Amino acid sequence: MVRIINLGAAQMGPIARDEGRAQVVERLIAHLREAKRRGCDLVVFPELTLTTFFPRWWLEDEAELEAFYETEMPGPQTRPLFDEARRLGLGFCLGYAELIPGDETRRKCRFNTAVLVGAEGEILGKYRKIHLPGHAEHEPQRAFQHLEKRYFEPGDLGFRVFRGFGGLIGMCICNDRRWPETYRVMGLQGVEMVLLGYNTPSRHPLTPDHDAPSWHHNTLSMQAGAYQNGTWVVGVAKGGIEEGVHHIAGSQIIAPSGETVAQAATEGDELITAACDLDLGRSYKAHIFDFARHREPRHYALITALKGAVTPEEGARIEAAAQAAREAAE
Ligand code: CDT
């Protein structure tokens, strides 16, 4: 049986600070209708799709900040998106800022979240961004802020893989795509398609030498994740100049070979599509990246033992301790 997902990557152009949810949802619905016209089954939207990328601002007023978050999904303002997708028989993946208000049993939490929604409107899976870039305090020397470490907590759901659309689907969000661990944890669960949205400024205030290769780093990370795990990777941007800050666009659909098969040409609202054969990953998973035959996890102890880099001497000590512990257990 051929397993093909007709996929739409729904790139968004800038979203203004005063653009209401209703206006944004109209833009998303336009994407859905175009996707239906082009035969899609599943549409992927960017990170924090419903608002401007608010972590660029230092916001002291809690009410002003929390207006950027959703407390339910779907909620009254996103219900029309869910209804239209169900009417069209389309699934979608949507990134948004999630607020859990907190009560006697749980403290308030804020996450950078994505949901995978099936063609019947059911939530098939949820992911909360794990690698949060940027900083937590106001840094006025920067041309713009990147306050994800202040406005979100690291996700608490892990890198799970969900059954849907005839395959095994994983999600991650923006900065996660730069970390090989993201893909490998999903690869170890047989992932066949990774969906991700991004908001990536093209200027890096503290590391201007990263500006020129910014586009290369984006592509390199996603293509490597695809190839090394034999999976499709779908990267969807919110691009263009948003509130004075330029973001890279270039949304891509990448095959398990690591080759890009579709790429956005503009920095605005643009749908790119591809018929994604999930079985294209099989030859990678069965041969060069047959994990069960070729991985050597006993030599990877440092990856889970450490958060930051250490000296070679300390690294050797930790490796040796891990080996001794293994031998003692055998
Ligand atoms: N949204 C997001 O994660 N953006 C980051 C920018 C990093 S620069 C602080 C990214 O990795 O694209």
Image: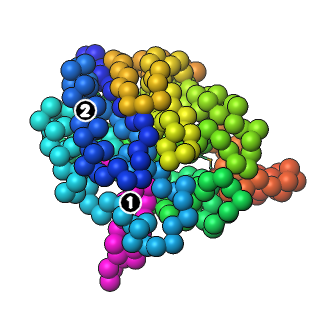
Disc 1 crowd, CA 10 A, few/some/many (<14, 14-19, 20+): some
Task: Tell me the CA gap for discs 1 and 2.
Answer: 22 Å
| Residue sitting at the far left | 87
x then y, percent, for residue 167: 32, 31
In the rendering, which numbered label is found on residue 68? 1
Residue drawn at x 67%, y 62% as measured from the top left = 140
Is residue 110 magenta-colored?
yes
Q: Is residue 221 above or below residue 2?
A: below
Which secondary structure dominates the residues rendered in magenta? strand
Residue drawn at x 41%, y 44% as measured from the top left = 15
Q: Is residue 325 above or below residue 269?
A: below
Residue drawn at x 25%, y 19% as measured from the top left = 38
Residue drawn at x 21%, y 25% as measured from the top left = 36
x then y, percent, for residue 233: 46, 30
In the rendered image, which residue does mark 2 sit on? 30
Question: Could you tell me which quadrant the N terminus lies in?
Answer: top left
Q: Mark 1 touching mark 2, by CB under 8 A? A: no
Say which element carries label 1.
loop
The quarter holding residue 10 reads top left
Q: Is residue 250 left or right of residue 122?
A: right
User: Can you see residue 296?
Assistant: yes
Q: Amino acid at mark 2?
A: Ala
x then y, percent, for residue 137: 63, 67
Q: Amino acid at mark 1?
A: Phe
Q: Which residues are magenta?
A: 96-115
User: Can you see residue 235?
Assistant: no
Q: Is residue 156 above or below residue 11?
A: below
Say which element carries label 2.
helix
Is residue 10 magenta-colored?
no
